Amino acid sequence: MASITFLIRNKKTLNQTPISVKVLWPHRNELVYSTGIKIAPQNWDSKNQKVRNKVEVASVKDLINVELSKIRTFTEQSYSDLKFNGELTKDNLKYKLDLYFNKVSETKKVETFYDYVENILVENAKNRVAKVTWKSYLRTLDLVKAFEVNEKYKISFEKINIDFYYRFIQYLEEIFEMSTNTIGKQIKNIKMFMNSANDDGYTICIGHKHKHFKVLKVESFQVYLNEDELNEIYKLDYEIDSVEDRVRDLFLMGAYTGQRISDWKKLNEDNIVECNGFSCFKIIQTKTKAEVVIPIHPNIQLIFDKRKGKAPKFVNEQDINEKLKQIASRAEIKQKIKEKGNIHKYELVSSHTARRSFCSNAYKAGMDSLAIMQLSGHKTEKNFLTYIKIGNEEFASRIANHKFFKV
């Protein structure tokens, strides 16, 4: 449960100063929010969390104490609701308090497609979804606006139909030279915008539900590194805590936990817990807000040991992807990938290769799919299976010892 207290930041002033509510919960999460209620510090009883019983504040004492009690009750309930729904974040809790203090409104006037997407859906999504997802909504919105101007196609709920679909795809192909999968992401967002507007009662238009209004997607080829290749990377000799050393170790930590690069920073000594005698990472994933508990692989323990129990310091994401290709090349990961025009495998290694490697290697080792999903944070098996990048022979090896194939 959260610790909820009231505090006055400037205790030395003689003037009235705001009382703030401070919410502290596990994993070093903290929110300090001004209630707007003011009191002179000498009239505040921090131990008992209320206005002192003094003559100079007799006329407001009870009113302030009652209001603080209401704020505490609301904050406790909001915290519990958000936690129960898996939506507990600092931003979401702040949004609840903003509503309580009438700093924002839950309802806004909606007359057009843009009114809804910008003022309702995207604004609310900022407090509910991962930053990268929220930014993708903004990107799609910008592309629709550019399309409207350049193609002189007036956007409205009614005009999001199959004609729009074909013209918008052609526009993205010709003007932005987008790949099929990138275009598919824009279509997916637009369908989500419209479905949400339908569900919220802002439109009854269903042009986006035409049978040919489909999210475009082609199977892309992605590599993973097997256990031998990961070991070759682990054995590379770098000066400790050089950029290359940190990038290599951060990547390996991702490959032995299945976490996205956005969560690599959380794989540190502060997030290690004991689970039935085993050391585990316990983190809240940035994208999904899901809590995951991952046993610490022996190679990760060695990475910590060489830094006397500390995790490697993080490196800029762009530098990570550039360095990884150099590291993989030095580790002699030079198999030619025919699906990619016979380029060397090391050229395809990126930060996301770590997550695919975890899923594929754990699957090959016989770990149950649901167990892997529990660790990686995948929500659906369909999405999870796209991460399993093993060939037919590797798959055959995995199931060869199944009792079905035994006499």
Image (tube, grey):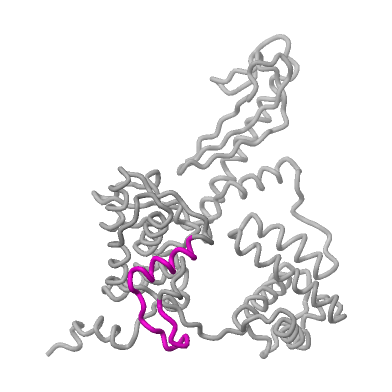
Give left or right: position of 305 versus 30.
left
Name the spot of residue 135 as percent of width and height, x first.
66, 63
Give left or right: position of 203 versus 41.
right
Q: Dividing the image into 4 quarters, which one contains the C terminus?
A: bottom left
Q: Residue at x 32, y 49 (%)?
A: 304
Name the spot of residue 261 as percent of width and height, x first.
48, 60
Residue 152: in sight, yes or no?
yes
Q: Residue at x 73, y 31 (%)?
A: 36
Taking 101 as reference, is 230 above or below it?
A: below
> Hey, which quadrant is residue 47 in on the image?
top right
Name the spot of residue 281 as percent of width and height, x first.
36, 52
**Is 322 in the magenta?**
yes
Q: Nearer the viewer, residue 387 or 243?
A: 243
> Hey, which quadrant is residue 186 in on the image?
bottom right
Q: Residue at x 87, y 80 (%)?
A: 152
Taking 328 as reference, is 298 above or below it?
A: above
**Is 69 in the magenta?**
no
Q: Nearer the viewer, residue 1 or 339?
A: 339
Q: Which residues are magenta?
A: 320-345
Q: Residue furthest top?
A: 55
Taking 182 as reference, is 24 above or below it?
A: above
> Hey, which quadrant is residue 337 in on the image?
bottom left
Give left or right: position of 35 versus 242.
right
